[in-house]
Image (spheres, rainbow, N blue to C red):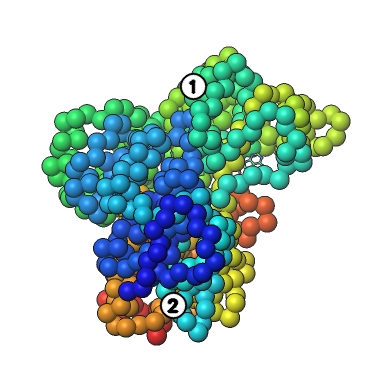
Amino acid sequence: MSVSSASSNQSSNSSTARTVDAVIVGAGFAGLYMLHRLREQGLTAQIFEAGSGAGGTWFWNRYPGARVDVESMQYSYQFSEELQQEWQWSERYAPQAELLEYLNHVVERFGLAPDIQFNTRVESAVFDDSSKTWQVSTDQGDQVNAKYCIMATGCLSKANKPDIAGMDSFNGPTYHTGEWPHEEVDFSGMRVGIIGTGSSAIQAIPEIARQAEHLTVFQRTPNFSVPARNKPLDPEEVKNVKQNYGALREAGQQQFGAFDADSNTKAAAEMSPEEIKAELNKRWQMGGLNFFGVFVDFLVTQETNDIVADFVREKIAERVNDPETAALLAPNTVFGCKRICADTDYFETYNRDNVTLVDISKTAISAITPEGLKVGDGSSEDKAYAFDALVFATGFDAMTGSLNKIDIRGCDGQTLKEKWAAGPLTYLGLCSAGFPNLFTISGPGSPSVFTNMVTSIEQHVEYIGDIIAYMTDNKLATIEASNEAETQWVAHVNEVASYTLLNSCNSWYLGANIPGKKRVFMPYAGGFPPYVAKCNEVAAKGYEGFTLT
Ligand code: N01
């Protein structure tokens, strides 16, 4: 194995290239486990992380109310029995601070810090065909050669900051939910404006409303949300889970979303009206993403989806006092076409006197101004709103954004960005033809965002680890997806999505939230178990669909 001088928490400005077996980009759930796994295999690895600490998503998304929506006992690593036994989650859905604490504990427990360099953004990764290595450069002047380059950059990492006239002109502070400051933000006594009503906003709005003098919400598209029903974890329940953790994990891996959720296996058409009503009410009471398990066909049969959507719309009408506001908050899209949100008192927040909803579905925000913003067609008739602080809850350039930010060049100098201009092309969401020894953890084309991310990440990390062990054992220099396998996989990903109702709205799954981004369905919607079966079959056939040299 090669040298590792990869042990600094400080930025190194050395212009001499050093060599490690693998460079890993990102220190979130994916990067941390990848580092641990490679070190266990006896390899040297270096993580570069743009943030000043570990945690990825949970490092950056510190907005008020941020918490996970998959139960914490399952949204956690399972690779270490000791870790899952010793860690104590306090709530059903852990808040951001606790998730960050957990990930920092993982860094400490497995001694990962020496191989993580913080405050360092990878600027380019270029494949050198003669040495068959990746040459990685950072904004701190690092030059590192590595046989493997592993992108653990996350699916929702590049903040989407809309291109609105006068964006930088606002006099007060502005925030993006995905880049929230580390110091506490106090909105007391302030007039606050928030743009967006996706998952981040739905969590932040109730918290900000409790603090601010007045909160104005600018909504372009309403979102479906179900009550999270978060609560402190019952020690008895925790004890039971821990006594049988393996069984819970095993059950989770057999489910579409890679978490155990007691799903109904029937389609709505197989149930009587009374059974349908009882199932909907049961799921509503369970709360959170358990609602996904309501009918097996809700994302493929329009009639079933209508039943679910109507039920949730009725609930919104019950939760919001003012009928006009309730009507504006009721989505008319397919239920689940956009990621379903789980909330605590989101809709009830609109019953407060200090909260106003502004519908911008027909008239957009025309400008950000020194005082606040304007809504209208850009004429003098535009309606002006004044604020002391502005929050952008406008989401992310999902799945490809964080990769396209890096100048990644494969064989013949082709950039990944150019190759993916018409949509991401991958084999299994892991590799792209023309980019040997480059891996994307939970990349486009893998189940990733449709699943418990931690479990999907672990499966990818272990799969990549196995590939690397196979390469070492067989003295191989490169592994690369074949064009044919990639084309077939991309076609399969699209075909699976086409059987569902997921193409019917402007979601970030399709890149439709980013102006100019090609509308292509990016994640694999076939579910975790068939995906894992396919990966295992590929491995059993000597990594079929890959070219090994
Ligand atoms: O982003 P989003 P998010 N003018 O894209 C609006 C995960 N997550 O950060 O729908 C006006 O969902 C946009 O409007 P529209 C989860 O996977 C998980 O909230 O495009 N409005 C939308 O309302 C989630 O899906 C958790 O018409 C503009 C909002 O901004 C994903 O992250 C918590 C606009 C963006 O919503 C992203 O969620 C939080 C413009 N120019 C996030 N541009 C949990 O685990 C955008 N919008 C609980």
Residue at the image position 80 percent from the left and 30 percent from the top: 382
Which comes sooner in the sequence, label 2 or label 1?
A: 1
Dot label at residue 480:
2
In this rendered view, identify the residue nearer to me: 55 or 391: 55
- The image quarter containing residue 548 is bottom left
| Image disc number at residue 348 | 1
Residue 426 vs residue 332: left or right?
left
At label 1, the amino acid type is Glu
Q: Quadrant of ligand 1?
A: top right
Percent x, y of residue 21 = 38, 70
Q: How crowded is the residue under tag 1: few (<14 C-alpha within 10 Å), some, or many (20+)?
A: some
User: Which image quarter holds the N terminus?
Assistant: bottom left
Disc 1 element? helix
- Marks 2 and 1, Cα distance to the nearest angstrom? 52 Å
Helix, strand or loop status at disc 2: strand
- Beta carbon at label 1 within 8 Å of ligand 1: no
Name the quadrant containing residue 102: top left
Instruction: Give amino acid for label 2.
Output: Glu
> Residue 125: horizontal and vertical position, in percent?
53, 68
Q: Is residue 96 visible?
A: yes
Q: Is residue 15 above or below residue 7?
A: below
